[in-house]
Amino acid sequence: MAERRMFSKKVVRSDWFSQMPQSAQNLYWHACMEADDDGFVSNMMQLMKMLGSSSDDFQLLLTKRFVMPFTNGLMLIKHWRVHNYIQNDRYTPTTFTDERESVKVKDNGVYSLDEGIPMNDVVVSMLYPQVRLGKDRLGKTTKRRSPKEIEALTAQFEEFWSQYPKKVGKKPCLNWWIRKNITKEVAQQIIVSIEQHKQSETWRKGFVPNPQTFLNQGRYEDEVEVTNKTAEYKSYK
């Protein structure tokens, strides 16, 4: 395997990359260093432990699609071929031949992976430890979320989190959001309800429940009495 690794400024100097915290960027640098000559990383969990990386760091890399997961826990650096060109006399093909055959390379050198491939149980349980896998409490089979679904749900949740005035317990709230598979319609209902609650006398006096309580108890379905009857509420599409 080649001993040198390169990084493209088009990727690591982009706003999409630089807006991540340093800890997430650090995890990406080291993952690229650990990858084989085709960009596959087989020890991401061990790497995280070694670096002291958090699940939020890993979640960011997945959400922003800097790394791409396979069902067996293997990770692929999406922009590997943008970063690296390895001469044939130094190139060692990956041992993960089945996974390599399932991946396409776009004209711009970026790897493309089937969007329907779900994250494996190890990845999901690490990122969302309160999300039950396989079966729920009633014994019914639950659907595993694909990376694309996780990304969409997380984006919706971030909109909720940015609007909610009390910032405590983010991770359990995110777990709840994903477990409930909140639709766009319900997400809009929650956001509008927050705006209405902000106009209520209770919230104006500072008696704002924790966001986890607000979600668990379904308070976004409550009728809200506002102190300013002429208040105009923002509509979210």
Image (cartoon, grey):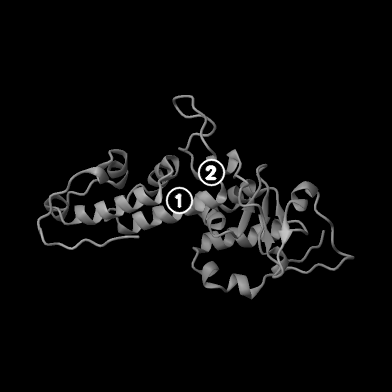
Would you say residue 54 is visible in this rendering?
A: no
> Residue 38 location, x and y as percent?
76, 58
Residue in view at x 65 percent, y 43 percent: 71
> Residue 181 location, x and y as percent?
44, 43
Residue in view at x 52 percent, y 30 percent: 141
The answer to whether marks 2 and 1 mark residues whose Cβ atoms lie closer than 8 Å is yes
On residue 231, the disc is none
Amino acid marked by disc 2: Arg
> Quadrant of residue 73 in the image?
top right
Instruction: State whether residue 81 is above or below residue 153.
Output: below
On residue 153, the disc is 1
Residue in view at x 48 percent, y 53 percent: 152
Q: Residue furthest right?
A: 89
Q: Which residue is mark 2?
A: 145
Q: Secondary structure at mark 1?
A: helix
Q: Secondary structure at mark 2?
A: loop
Residue nearest the observer in this picture, 205 or 184: 184
